[in-house]
Image (cartoon, rainbow, N blue to C red):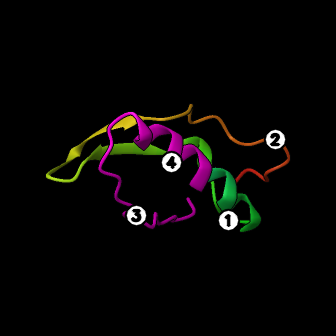
Amino acid sequence: MTQRYVIHLPIVANDLPAVPRLALVVGRWLLVLPHTEPGGTTVSAEDGQNLRHWVSCDAPMPGRPDE
């Protein structure tokens, strides 16, 4: 089994309706990096980060190698 690690990168928005849109934009922008998987994007309240909400599905992106 290959060990994988996840980097959690906090990005803050003050407007609840803007949070999913901002998360999608950041996820799509990060596609320039080969090891990102924006399909796993979640959002949470700053003081409740254990409760995460999916922004998009967790399906692997087309053309990405399986690990």
Q: Earlier in the sequence, mark 1 or mark 2?
A: 1
| Range covered by the magenta-colored residues | 1-26
**Quarter occupied by the N terminus:** bottom right
Q: Earlier in the sequence, mark 1 or mark 4?
A: 4
Q: Are marks 3 and 2 in contact (CB under 8 Å)?
A: no
Q: Earlier in the sequence, mark 3 or mark 2?
A: 3
| Mark 3–mark 2 distance (CA, rounded to whole Å) | 23 Å
Q: Which residue bears the numbered disc 3?
A: 8
Q: Which residue bears the numbered disc 4?
A: 22
Amino acid type, callout 1: His
| Mark 1–mark 4 distance (CA, rounded to whole Å) | 20 Å
Q: Main secondary structure of the magenta part?
A: loop
Instruction: Please provide percent x and percent y for residue 46.
Output: 21, 53
- SS for tag 1? loop
| Mark 1–mark 2 distance (CA, rounded to whole Å) | 13 Å
- SS for tag 4? helix
Q: Residues within 10 Å of mark 3 (few under 14, many from 20)?
A: few
Q: Are marks 4 and 3 in contact (CB under 8 Å)?
A: no
Q: Closer to the camera: disc 2 or disc 4?
A: 4
Q: Which residue bears the numbered disc 2?
A: 62
Amino acid type, callout 4: Leu
Q: Residues within 10 Å of mark 1 (few under 14, many from 20)?
A: few
Residue farthest to the right, as pictured: 63
Judging depth in this view, the residue of 5 and 57 nearest the camera is 57
Q: Residues within 10 Å of mark 2 (few under 14, many from 20)?
A: few
Q: Earlier in the sequence, mark 1 or mark 3?
A: 3
Residue at 64% x, 60% y is 36
